[in-house]
Image (tube, coloured by chain):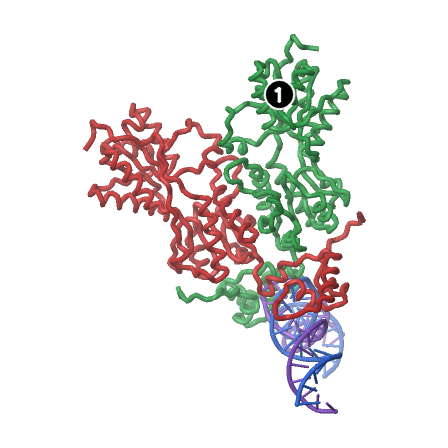
Chain colours: A red, B green, C blue, D purple
Amino acid sequence: MQHVTQRRKRVTQAEVARLAGVSQAMVSLVLNDSDGVRVAPETRKRVEEALRQTGYTVDIMGRRLRGKSNRILGVFTYEAVFPSGTADFYGPFLGGIEEESEAQGFDLLLFTSPGRRQGRRKVYEKGSNRLGIADGCILLGRHTDRDELDRLVDERFPFVFIGRRESSAGPVSYVGGDYAAATAALHERLWSLGHRRVALVGYREESESTADRRDGYLRACRRHRKTPLALTDVDPSAVFERLRADRVTAALVETTEMAVALHALAMNSGLRVPEDLSIGVLGDTDPTQTSSWPLRATPEIDWTTFRIPRREMGSRAVRILVGMLRGDIEPGRRSQVLLPCELVDGSTVAEAPRTTAR
Amino acid sequence: MQHVTQRRKRVTQAEVARLAGVSQAMVSLVLNDSDGVRVAPETRKRVEEALRQTGYTVDIMGRRLRGKSNRILGVFTYEAVFPSGTADFYGPFLGGIEEESEAQGFDLLLFTSPGRRQGRRKVYEKGSNRLGIADGCILLGRHTDRDELDRLVDERFPFVFIGRRESSAGPVSYVGGDYAAATAALHERLWSLGHRRVALVGYREESESTADRRDGYLRACRRHRKTPLALTDVDPSAVFERLRADRVTAALVETTEMAVALHALAMNSGLRVPEDLSIGVLGDTDPTQTSSWPLRATPEIDWTTFRIPRREMGSRAVRILVGMLRGDIEPGRRSQVLLPCELVDGSTVAEAPRTTAR
DNA sequence: GTCAAGGGCTAATACGTATTATCATGGGTG
DNA sequence: CACCCATGATAATACGTATTAGCCCTTGAC
C-alpha cells in the first residue's frame, strides 16, 4: 500500500506485548503453551488478537540463542549440488534427504558459501565452521578430507555421512551401501554361470567404498579358493591386455566409465560382450544420472550391476541425524548402517564361454 | 579420542577470552578487525593462539541477533525440489542460484519444513513465517498463492520471485522469461514461412506466464491484421478438430505435453508434421528435464521452440536479491527483469502447405 | 609539575526469546 | 485477624556477539 521504502523492521514479542498491554513474557507464554503455567483466557485472547494484528513471526535466531533447536539440518557437499549439465550425482540423495526432513519438520541449509580450495569445498575456512548454524549436518561427497573428518568427530558436532567413513578420532555415523555384500553376490552370480577366472577392476585411489568392493571380491575368491586378480584403472588398454593374458572370462568393474572403456576395447579386439567376456558393474549410475548425461557418446548399454539405494540412503541419514538430535541415538554402532544393494540383471553377463572354460 | 558421550558444547568468545587472559570484547575485536580500534600486536597474537587452540567458530545466530547479516539466502519452492524420478523442474533454476550464491558468499536455506496444505507448500503456517531466518528469499513454483504474495510484499521482506508476478500490494521483484517477445518472434517466424492461419493453444488456468504468451500472440496477430484464434487445453481432440475446421496451418502450443498430444492426433488423422501442420512450442522443457523423463512414451521429438534461460534466471535473481540486501536496489522497476528467450529451430516447423495457403 | 593526547584495553549494553523466580491479589480457613 | 494457597501476571536473567562509552596508563609538550 504505502510505497515508502524503508528498512523492514521485524515485529518483536515486545511490540506485540505493548499492543496487548501485557509483558513480553506473557506473549512468549501464550506462544509456547508451556504446561504448568496458566494464562487467563481473557488475556490469551487479547494476546492472540495482537499477534494476528501485527503479523508477528517468531525469530528463530533468538530462540536458538535461548538454547532451543532451530529445526535446521545442514547439508554439506564437497562439490556443487546442482550440476551444470553433466552428471547429476547428488540428485537422488538429496531427494531422500528433502523428503525425510520435510516429514520430520526440518528445513535444509545448503552450505555453498565457504570458499573452495582448488575447486573443492572445505568445511573449515578461516576458523569459522559454518556448520554450527544448523542443529546437525549431513555430509556427502566423493572426496573427503581426512583432517576435516577427524576434527568434526572431535568437535562432537552431530553429523551423519552418506557413504561409509572411518576416522581415528572416534566412531563416525554413516549410511552407506553394502558394496562388499553386493560385489560378493555379483561374483557368485558369475561363478554359477561357469566363470572361473573373474577379475576386479577398481579405482587406484583408496577410499572406503573402493575398499569395500575389494573386500567383497576377495572374500568371494577365498570362498572358491581362487587367487584373486585385482587391477586398477590406470590405463584401460593395459588393463584389457592383462585380462586377455590371464584368460579372464568375466570382469567386475567399479564404474560405468571403466566398463564403457573395456566394452569398447573388447569390441575392437573382436571379442563379444557378453558371449566372450562378461562385464559386471559394481554399482549403478543412477537412472536419473544416466539419462542426464547428454554427452554420453556410447549407446545405452544395459549393464549387469547392482542398484545403490541412493534415495533411501538420504532419507535414512536424516532419520539417524534427527535421532541423534533427540538423544535417542549415540554416534556408534547403532548409527552405522549399510543398506543392501539389489542385483540388476542386464545383458552384459552370460554363461562362460565353453572354449576357455576351466 | 575420549569416547565419553557428552552433549557437545559450543566454544564461545568468553572461553577463548578466559584462555587468552583478555575480555570477551577483545576477542570480538580481533575477530572482526574493526577499523578505528587498535589492538596491540602482542595481545592479538595471544588471542589468535587461543582461537586456534580452542577451535572457536563464530555463532552466526548470536551475530545475527546483534543485527548483522547471517549471509543466508532462503529458497522457497511450492513443490518438492528434488523429484522422485519424474520431471526435474527446479534443477536448472537452482543450479544458477547455487552458483551465484556461492560466488556472493551466501549459504542457501531450503525451506522444506512448513506443513503442506493439500500437497502444496505454504509460506505462512501457524503465524510463523520461517522465511525470516534468512536475510532474503528467492521464491519459485508453478503455483502461487495470491494472498501469501500480497502479505509478503506487505511485510517488506526482501524477496525475489522467479517468474513474473504481480501483486496489488506493491511492486514485486522478479526475474522472468520474456515470453511475450519470444512468442511474437515465433509467430513472426511462422508468418515468414507463409503461414497465415496461426492458432494459440494455452493453459486455461490464468497465470502471468500464460498471459504473457497470449499477449505476444495477440500482438503479432494485430500487427498482421489477422483475427486471433486462442484455444485452451481442455480437450486435446476438441482442440484438434477446431484447428482442422479453421484450416489452421500452424499452432503455437504452450507446453510440450500439449504438443505431444496434438502431434499424435495429427499423425492419426494422416496429417504430417511439419509438412501439413507446423507446431511451435512456447518454451522448452529443459534438456535436463527432458532427458530425465524416462517414462516418456513418445520418441524424442525435435521441437521448434524457444529456450527459457532457467539457469541464468536463477543466478540473476540472486544478484538482484543481494543487491536489495546491500541497499543498492529497491523493489521496483530496477528489480523487475525479463530475460530474452532464444529461438530454437527444430523439425516441427516448415513452410506452409501450398494447397491451403492464403 | 600539570595537562592533553592518545593507545590499549574493559565494562556495559542491546539484540529477541524462553524460563524461572518473584510478586500481587484475593478467597478461603483456622 | 493472621495465615496459606491458588491464580495470574511480571521482573529478571541467560544465551553469544558487536559496539560504544569510558577507564587506566604512558608519553610528550608546556
Q: Is residue B258 above or below residue A113?
A: above
- Where's residue B112, x and y in %? 58, 49
Few, some or many residues within 10 Å of mark 1 (<14, 14–19, 20+): many
Q: In which quadrant of the rendered view does residue A333 lie?
A: bottom left
Q: Residue furthest top?
A: B355
| Residue at image point 72% right, 27% down | B216
Looking at the image, which residue is at 60% across and 45% down?
Answer: B101
Q: Residue at x 60, y 60 (%)?
A: B61
Quadrant in which the C terminus of chain B appears: top right
- Name the quadrant of the N terminus of chain B: bottom left
Q: Position of residue C9 (x, y in %)?
A: 61, 71
Please name the amino acid that badge 1 sits on. Ile
The secondary element bearing badge 1 is classed as strand
- Depth order, front residue of B177/B291: B291
Give the left or right position of residue B178, taking residue B265 as reference: right
At which x and y percent is residue B269? 58, 15
Would residue A308 be found to the left or right of residue A25 on screen? left
| Chain letter for mark 1 | B
Judging by the rendered image, the residue that carries numbered circle 1 is: B279
